[in-house]
Amino acid sequence: IWFINESAIIEDWDRYVDLSYTYYFCQPIRIKGRFWNHGYDKVQQFDADKMIDWEPLVLTFKLAGITTIILLIISIPLAYWLTRTQSYFKTVIETLVSMPLVLPPTVLGFYLLVLFSPSNKFGQWIDNWLGLRLVFSFHGLVIASTIYSLPFMVHSIQSGLSNLPPSLAEASYILGKSRITTLFKILLPKKIG
């Protein structure tokens, strides 16, 4: 049995508090473009432009822009086809489009990593014939982002198009407009407006 008097506990506690204060609170902290050292009266100035790395922000906006353009090109015709068709393949395509909603993002990322890896036959084919190495590259990031975001875009456009009355499209067809003209000049503007 250890007997410790109160003064020893208090001394050890003070030493512990001093060490933790030194470790946690004397680290430099950046506040509004300055480094503040707790416990010291010094304030060090620094140049904010040299401290900020703009590359991740530029990469994020570049990825978002390219993914959005690709999604618009793919999702509008796909949602229109899913809205208007009664084909057997409709359920298969809807299931494939909705798959990223069901799978967790880590599982989807792992499957894409395995699919596009150079050790896989499909990844070797893409690398040899197209000259693209999709694993850990910007092209692979765009493809993964497009696949992950596809259900959100397709389902929202499909829902909007299915709520429009069929008489709009029928009137356009009677007036001699094609399906593409009807989609882009009548149905989409009606849904947006």
Image (cartoon, rainbow, N blue to C red):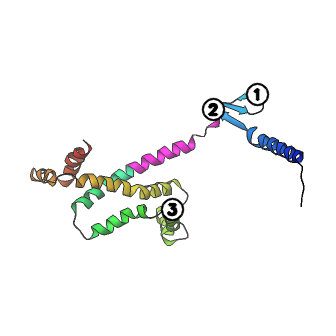
Point out the frontmost of discs 1 and 3: 1
Q: Nearer the viewer, mark 1 or mark 2?
A: 1
Kind of residue sitting beneath label 3: Gly
* Any part of residue 127 in sight: no
Q: Is residue 14 left or right of residue 64?
A: right
Q: Is residue 136 magenta?
A: no
Image-quadrant location for residue 17: top right
- Quarter of the picture holding the C terminus: top left
Q: Position of residue 151 (x, y in %)?
A: 37, 58
Ranked by sequence position, the earlier of labels 2 and 3 is 2
Q: Main secondary structure of the magenta part?
A: helix
Which residue is tagged 3?
Answer: 109
Quadrant position of residue 19? top right
Q: Residue at x 79, y 40 (%)?
A: 22
Q: Which residue is mark 1?
A: 42
Percent position of residue 112, x then y = 49, 64
Taking the spot 22% from the left edge, 51% from the top edge, the residue there is 183
Q: Residue tagged by mark 2?
A: 48
Within 10 Å of disc 2 (Cα), the crowding (few <14, some 14-19, many 20+) is few
Q: Which residue is at a point 89% across and 47% down the rendered structure image?
A: 8
Q: Find numbered disc 3 in the image and state the secondary structure of the residue it sits on.
A: helix
